[in-house]
Image (tube, rainbow, N blue to C red):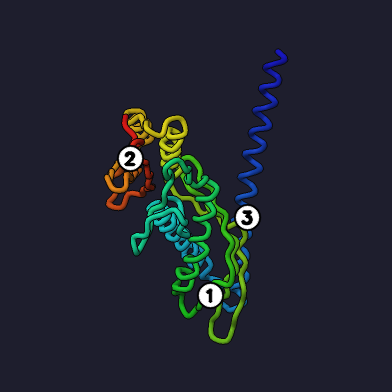
Amino acid sequence: MKKRGQVSVLIIVAIMVIVAVAVYLSLSNQSSTNNLRSALSKIGISQQVNVLENSIGECLKTTLDDAIGVIGIQGGFYTRPEASEDLGITFIPYYYDQGSFLQPSLNKIESEISDFVNEFLPFCIEDIVIEDILLKQESIKTITKINPGEVEIQSDMQITLSKGDQTTLIELTSYPTRLNSKLNEMYEISEYIIDSHRGDPEFICINCMADMAEEKGLFVDMLSFEVPFTTLFIISEDTDSTDPKILEFLNKYPESETPIE
């Protein structure tokens, strides 16, 4: 009976936490909407609040989607690391280099996504066209979280709205954006590959890796080069999309340690 009572208390506490989070997010979104409405009222176009809010939301989604795509191609990096191959318009980093383990942490990849969003979101925001309103991004700070099945960002932004000679500043705090993504799952497979070399640099269980990818709805392709002894790993989504997201990286081995199944 005592255990049942403890379980009941835990369930109640869990429900309270879920409700509290839901209320917080609702109030946060409502606060952003109120800030927009107040700012637009100052320049006489408060009726455009929904259009502007939707436009900002679409910019965030588009920029986040671009970030996941570009940073996946670049092995989790926005800024090129020293241990990488320069391909001109992009680069591919080394996760393993003849005994050196160079894979970025998940926190590092989250930080790189934030940097990308902070860099490119202003271009989208300033291209928004609503009547005669001009938008200018004054500041932005983004926090990224890579979760199972999704990537989430929270952005604090200051945007100047101008119409004619009237100007007003809006502040959007903790503006949330989420996209479905298997970046977390791709990272788990890359981590399995790199961790395999910690125990034995000459070994990768190809079947284990393939089974793991299949369970997560992913593909793993390997392309080996003889000189130097390098393997390109490409982990991609199992999707019919013409633009599937990927995570790719390089491993370099001494000739005697080229991995086998």
Residue pushed farthest bottom? 165
- Label located before the other in sequence (3 or 1): 3
Q: Mark 3 points at which residue?
A: 28
Q: Residue at x 41, y 34 (%)?
A: 201
Whole-Å distance between the Cαs marked 2 and 3? 56 Å
- Label located before the other in sequence (2 or 1): 1
Give the percent coordinates (x, y) of residue 192. Answer: 43, 35
Frontmost of labels 2 and 3 is: 2
Q: Which amino acid does label 3 sit on?
A: Ser
Q: Name the residue under label 1.
A: 136
Q: Name the residue under label 2.
A: 255
Frontmost of labels 2 and 1 is: 2
Q: What residue type is labelled 1?
A: Lys
Give the percent coordinates (x, y) of residue 38. Answer: 63, 70
Q: In this view, does 46 lie above or below 12?
A: below
- CB under 8 Å between discs 3 and 1: no
Q: Which sits in the foreground, 261 or 71?
A: 261
Q: Is residue 195 above or below residue 85?
A: above
Give the percent coordinates (x, y) of residue 49. Answer: 53, 67
Of the 4 image quadrants, the one containing the N terminus is top right
- CB under 8 Å between discs 2 and 1: no
Q: In the image, is 255 to the left or to the right of 2? A: left
Give the percent coordinates (x, y) of residue 127. Answer: 44, 73
Q: Which amino acid does label 2 sit on?
A: Glu
- CB under 8 Å between discs 2 and 3: no
Question: Could you say whether the residue bearing mark 3 is in a helix, strand or loop?
Answer: helix
